[in-house]
Amino acid sequence: MVSCDLCGKGFHFNCHLEKHLSRKFPCFSHMKPNNGNTHLENETTPHLNKQGDDKFCKFCQKSHVKPKLHANTCNMKEDEIRCLEIKLKKDVHLTHNNSCRFCLSAFSRADKIKSHYKCCGKRKEYLVELKNQCTSKKREHHHTTNIYNNNNTTINNNNQTYVINWSNENFSHIKPNQLVDILKKCVLDGCPKRFFSEFPRLAHTGEHRNVSLTNVRGECVDVYEDGKYIKMDKDAVMEDAAKRMIYCLDDKLTENDELNDCYNRVLSAMVCMENVVSGINNKSRETIEALRMMGLKIETARKDILKEVTIGYRNV
């Protein structure tokens, strides 16, 4: 035995129930309105189709043999009220009979309902109510997001790492034994000029991360000064960085007991690179010998050294 979900009347056969629901004046039209909110949630009336069904359409609440094909042609998909109900997660039960679910007016044909919806006052009131609920929900979400972002900003500001200005950087935190390790590694690899690309990865960590180079082909580099990163000319910064590396070598490794004669000659050659980096055209015997030991040519020495420095800062 089956029963009508709207009026509770029982029937022995499904065909009798279908005939009962397709009457000219369905039983739904004789039900008393519940404080004018008959179109809203109905918790006592179960859905005819289960939401978990793969063939169930959430817009028209019907099961279809080809749900994907129906999804492109469902008329309820373009209904503004139905879309808002789904967005607000309203539990609404659609009856699919020839009556208006907003004002309970009954009609003989389904096409009459569509024309009635254009002028139904209850429907317009319900639409305004849904829009107001949707607006309120957006405001609550926006307010919650702002609080979350403000809290994150406060946490980030509290945990912000102090960074030394690039103008005050002198690499005083580098220990002599660290420089010795880099120098020996580059000499054993047969490429002493690689020192200029290995040094930045050692020196620019933590609070000394004051140079940021993301584009090796660009003309600018980000340099940290007074609490923010500013754009500066890349060639000027790379030249300044190369000179500071040479000064650091000269201060900490000159007459170092850990270096033998071979490494001391390479160290002296690197110190001579200051004039090369500065662009001074010095063709003295000492400079030519230093360039030979570094594996550089006098015509391209400055360009090659700055290229190594650029690669080093790119990998920081």
Image (cartoon, helix red, strand yellow):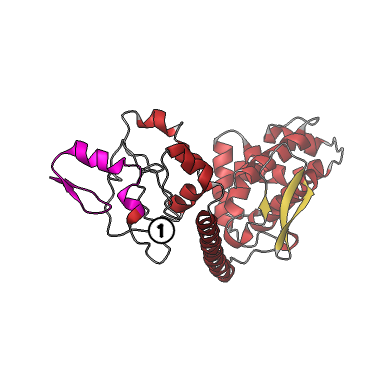
The spot of residue 17 in percent (x, y) is 22, 42
Residue 197 placement: quadrant: top right
Residue lying farthest to the right in this orientation: 281
Q: Quadrant of the N terminus?
A: top left
List x then y, in percent, for residue 43.
30, 59
Q: How many marks?
A: 1
Please tell me which residue lies in front, 143 or 36.
36
Residue at image position (30%, 50%) is 27
> Seen in the image, is 225 located left or right of residue 197?
right
Q: Residues within 10 Å of mark 1 (few under 14, many from 20)?
A: some
Examine the rendering and report whether any part of residue 272 can be seen.
no
Q: Which residue is mark 1?
A: 40
Q: Residue at 31% of width from left, 42% of height from top?
A: 23
Above or below, comparing residue 127 to residue 25 in the picture: below
Q: Residue sitting at 74 percent across and 39 percent down?
A: 218
SS of the residue under disc 1: loop
Of 75 and 67, which appears nearest the observer? 75
Q: 187 left or right of 105?
A: right
Residue 263 on image: x %, y %: 61, 43
Is residue 25 shown to the viewer in this render?
yes
Q: How far across and how far down the image is residue 220, in percent?
A: 76, 45
In front of the other: 146 or 20 = 20
Q: Is residue 235 magenta?
A: no
Check disc 1 and give the amino acid type.
Leu
- In the image, is 148 to the left or to the right of 311? left
Left or right: 233 with respect to 164?
A: right
Q: Nearer the viewer, residue 166 or 6?
A: 6
Q: Magenta residues?
A: 1-29
